[in-house]
Amino acid sequence: MLVLPYTPQTDPARALWVAERALEGGVNWVMLRVRGLPARLAIDGALELRRLTHAHGARLSVNPYPALAEWVNADALHLPEDAPPYTPPAPMQLGRSVHSVDAARRAEAEGCRYLLVGTMFPTQSHPDKPPEGIELLRQVRAAVSIPLIAIGGITPERVAACIEAGAQGVAVLSGIVDAPDPADAATHYWAALCACAT
C-alpha cells in the first residue's frame, strides 16, 4: 500500500505523478491521506487517483473523510484509531489504524475489514513517536482474524520481518514518495513481498 499524503503543502501534480509511477512499479493499493485540508479541497486529486487506480486494477482508500470516500467511490474508508464509529455504504470497506491490541479488537468488532498496525520502526513521518515494534504486530495477529498491514519505517529489507510476524502486506510513505523514482522503489517492495510468498 502506498500512503499518499495530501496536505496544504502538497503539490497535486507531483503527488499524482508519484502515484502513477508507484502503480507502474507494482503498487496495488493507494491510500490518500488528507491532513489539514477540508475534504472539498481534495476532491480533484481524489478523483484523479480513482481514475489511476482503476486503470491499474488497484484499490483506493481515503483517509479520513467519509464524504470524500463516498464521492469518489473509493474501495475503502480508512479511519484513525480514535475516530468515531462509522459504517460506510456497501461495498465500500472500512479500515482503521491501530496501535494496541485493545484497539484492534474494537476495530474488528466494529466491522473493519483490515487494519494498519504500527508503528513498526522509526519513521520520518513521525520522528518523535517511539515505534511499537514488531511485537505489537505479533500480538494483534493473535488477537484478531482480519488482514493486517504493517506500517512505519518499512524498507524492502524489513518486509520479511513484518510478513513473518503476521502481516498480509505493508504500507509505505516516504520509502516511495521521497524516492527519486517511485516506480523503481515500488518494484523493490513488490519483489520483497513476492519473496515472502515463495
Image (cartoon, helix red, strand yellow):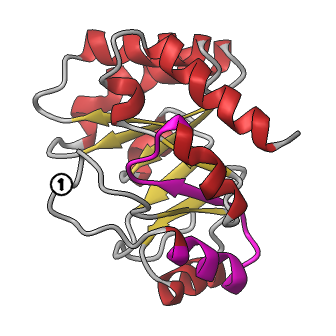
**How many marks overall?**
1
Q: Which of these two is toward me, 68 or 56?
A: 56
Residue 110 seen in the current view? no
Residue 113 location (% of width, % of height): 68, 63
Q: Residue furthest right?
A: 198
- Residue at image coords 38%, 58%: 121
Image-based side of 5 in relation to 154, left or right = left
Image-based side of 173 in relation to 198, left or right = left
The answer to whether 196 is drawn above or below residue 101 in the figure is above
Q: Which residues are magenta?
A: 135-156
Q: Which of these two is toward me, 76 or 114?
A: 114
Residue on which the image places disc 1: 127
Image-based side of 195 in relation to 36, left or right = right
Residue 139 covered by magenta stretch:
yes
Residue 126 location (% of width, % of height): 22, 55
Residue 187 location (% of width, % of height): 60, 19
- Residue at image coords 28%, 9%: 13
